[in-house]
Image (cartoon, coloured by chain):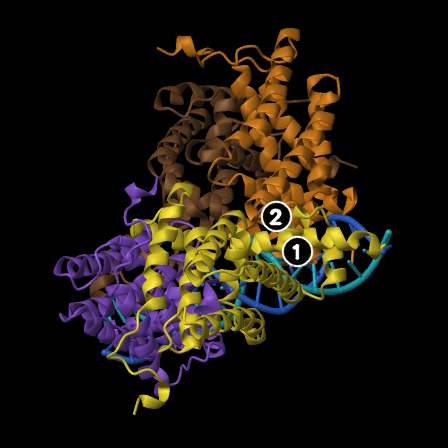
Chain colours: A orange, B brown, C purple, D yellow, E cyan, F blue
DNA sequence: AATGAATGAGAATTCATTCAT
DNA sequence: TATGAATGAATTCTCATTCAT
């Protein structure tokens, strides 16, 4: 019998939870099987978490915390936009491979109904802030075309990143990825990265002429 | 008699299923409430579908079928790439608003575990085919830069579209959209469309020089 | 498989519940064992009653309803007080023997905590009303001494009756009864009845002199 | 060391047990909360008592022991029957107020199923002995009518006392008491006592004529 | 053929009891 | 020796599925 759950063990439990939830979804994962996976009895889970809901929440927090940490690291680099993006992509792909559970868990989170909007705001707010600022700064420096809404630009950018994550970590998206000739095997990473860079690069630099630039000009 | 019920009623049942699954997820939706919603007894449901699994599958098929139909219509237009894309985006946003259930259901599908890869292949294969061909043709015509992998280009393109769909139909993504200053209200549609077009436009037309063009050139 | 719970079957379920609760108490009786006893699956119980609490409540109601019915019958007789009481006692003892479960269940009810006061008021209010009125009328007619508070008199009277019920139906009280030389076997009934009548008779008829008659005279 | 804890602490634990059991019943009271209330760890509880059952038994014993002590004191007085009874009642009511837990616990005990008959015999045997002897002696002295079975007389007498205890200490009986116009507030004590005395007094002194005197005369 | 009540396996949760420290 | 965290059997409750009518 374990004497007391150490900090480490507690972490392990959450990881097991994340792994189970990532694999089976919140409803299909059973507290019992999570406990077993962690080598514990159900009782312990309920000692530390009031109920399944609370445990899910803890896993969600840990997952988002992990992602946020990763994003922070990623955002820290200073470089020319394209190089920065290149490094972001590299890290992202690597992370998606190594911590697939977190990405899959994240995908599950996007399905959660109820009062989880705050969660979205927490994690997505962080990302959106970083990216938007990143874009805005680059626009100031003239590294990126200025005739585009930095918020939406960041949004499209992040959309591409999210889809890459899913495409590397989630079964359905992996399959889909393959259909597009993409490879979710290590070898192709470099190539995919470069192609995506190319796709973005132009978006970053060209100045279009025949599309209205600002909301105000619409009417 | 079966035949009497069939056509219309069966459609209705599937629609109810899709609506329930879209809203509550596959686990949380109950066969009973679906039957009630469709004005049927559970018994009939089980006459037509062996079990919940089978019923889900039928709903999934219908949903994907619906989406495919919509995509076909969308793809049918012939026009200059950017104009074509503009019309695609317009339709897409409109559809996401009007048939949110289908989009939400689709999001649920992307979470399904098990032997659903074939499903992915069915629907995504269709899309990927269309888009890739669309890109390739445009490249031939010189409407789009040629130094890019048409498959991956189509992939990135579709990624952006998928995220738009979700951002217009799924609660979590809607919330996220707002954080980026995006508006999921009718008024903003035009603006968002244009910004996205701008984001893509350059990707379509610029020819980059310092990024390797083909897989083969990598080593 | 039963097709549908008839009125009778539903009654039977409640009787099984009463019997189980009477024997094991509310906490120790399990829904499963009650269902089994009634030859049903747990599911049915939960079809008809929201939860254990609700089922208990239904059993309590039925039990109190039964007791009330019995009390009504008992109260209906018109006769000279002592004869009336004699018949009450007879019925009471008979009932306690035949419907021990109801009496035992009633004893359990007296332990219930929570919002069951209303229940007490329902059943006890009924009894207290009947007895108090019965005493008051007898006082008017001169059949019973008038220098006593009819309410309290009825209270003491009912106390004796309650204890008789328990003594005939509840294990602990039965054992206690025996220690007093009382017999809870059929043969002794008549004798016990008569002794109790004698105990009460005098209370009914003598007019004491050295005990203050009314509340007001106390100070 | 065990010895250190023992005497006082053990008493305290038992008191906590009694208090918890009195309030929540045997099933609903948890060993953990009892230990906490006593400022102990569950471990110690299980050092002294094999299991919950054994602990309950110990509490039951202590409770009955306490009641017995109180009854002994009560029985010690020598006086004329009615005066004696008056003093008994006074003490009883006072005790029921001051040591409600013991009375409530006692009520719980009367519900215990299993091999608790011995318990009944222990405590009730004591009471019944005292009362029966008290009645018999008074009959000899001519203080109480002789045409009544002293055992049953004592039984009825004790029945009235028990009900008074419950009516002063147990929620359900308190509520019931109120319905009869009884007051469980201090002020009414004197009045209730006197009314009960009056109710009993006559039973003690009148000699009825038309009810058979002894068991043997029945046939 | 349609109905919807009954079934019962399985999930969440509690708590008496054990035992490593 | 005392502690209180861990254990896991048992309980309540749900819901996909069956089947008598």
- Asked if labels 2 and 1 share a chain, the reply is no
Give the residue drawn at x 39%, y 85%: C185
Give the alpha-carbon distance from disc 2 to disc 1, as whole Å.
50 Å
Q: Position of residue D175 (x, y in %)?
A: 36, 50
Whether residue B68 is visible to the viewer of this picture, yes or no, is: no
User: How many residues crowd around disc 1 within 10 Å: few (fewer than 14), some, or many (20 or more)?
Assistant: many
**Quadrant of the rendered structure where residue B94 is?**
top left
Give the residue drawn at x 50%, y 30%: B141
Question: The N terminus of chain B is located in which quarter?
Answer: bottom left
Give the SS element for disc 2. helix
Question: The C terminus of chain B is located in which quarter?
Answer: top right
Any mark on residue D14, and which? 1
- Relative to B23, is D2 on the left or the right? right
- Relative to B1, is D201 on the left or the right? right
Q: Position of residue D62 (x, y in %)?
A: 64, 61
- Relative to B149, is D159 on the left or the right? left
Give the SS element for disc 1. helix
Query: Subunit of mark 1?
Result: D
Give the residue drawn at x 68%, y 40%: A96
Query: Subunit of mark 2?
Result: A
User: How many residues crowd around disc 2 within 10 Å: few (fewer than 14), some, or many (20 or more)?
Assistant: many
Q: Position of residue B36 (x, y in %)?
A: 29, 56
Q: Is residue D160 above or below residue C4?
A: above
> Relative to the observer, which residue lies in front, B44 or B8?
B44
> Relative to the observer, which residue lies in front, D109 or D143?
D143
> Relative to the observer, which residue lies in front, C120 or D200?
D200
Give the residue drawn at x 28%, y 68%: C202
Determine which residue is flagged by label 2: A22
Q: Is residue B187 above or below residue C205?
A: above
């Amino acid at each position: 019998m374990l004497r007391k759950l150490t900090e480490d063990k507690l972490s392990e439990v959450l990881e097991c939870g994340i792994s189970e939830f990532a694999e089976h979804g919140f409803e299909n994962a059973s507290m019992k099987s999570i406990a077993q996976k962690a080598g514990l009895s159900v009782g312990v889970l309920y000692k530390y978490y009031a109920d399944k809901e609370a445990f899910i929440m803890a896993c969600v927090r840990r997952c988002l915390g992990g992602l946020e940490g990763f994003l922070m690291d990623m955002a820290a680099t200073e470089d020319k936009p394209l190089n920065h993006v290149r490094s972001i992509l590299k890290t992202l792909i690597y992370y998606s491979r190594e911590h697939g559970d977190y990405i899959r868990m994240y995908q599950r989170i996007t399905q959660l109904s109820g009062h989880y909007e705050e969660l979205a705001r927490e994690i997505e707010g962080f990302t959106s802030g970083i990216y938007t600022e990143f874009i805005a700064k680059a626009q100031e420096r003239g590294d990126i075309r200025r005739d585009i809404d930095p918020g939406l630009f960041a949004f499209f950018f992040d959309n591409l990143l999210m889809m890459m994550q899913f495409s590397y970590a989630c079964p359905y998206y992996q399959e889909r990825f393959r259909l597009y000739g993409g490879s979710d095997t290590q070898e192709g990473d470099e190539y995919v990265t470069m192609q995506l860079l190319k796709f973005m690069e132009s978006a970053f630099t060209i100045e279009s002429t025949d599309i209205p630039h600002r909301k105000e000009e619409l009417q």
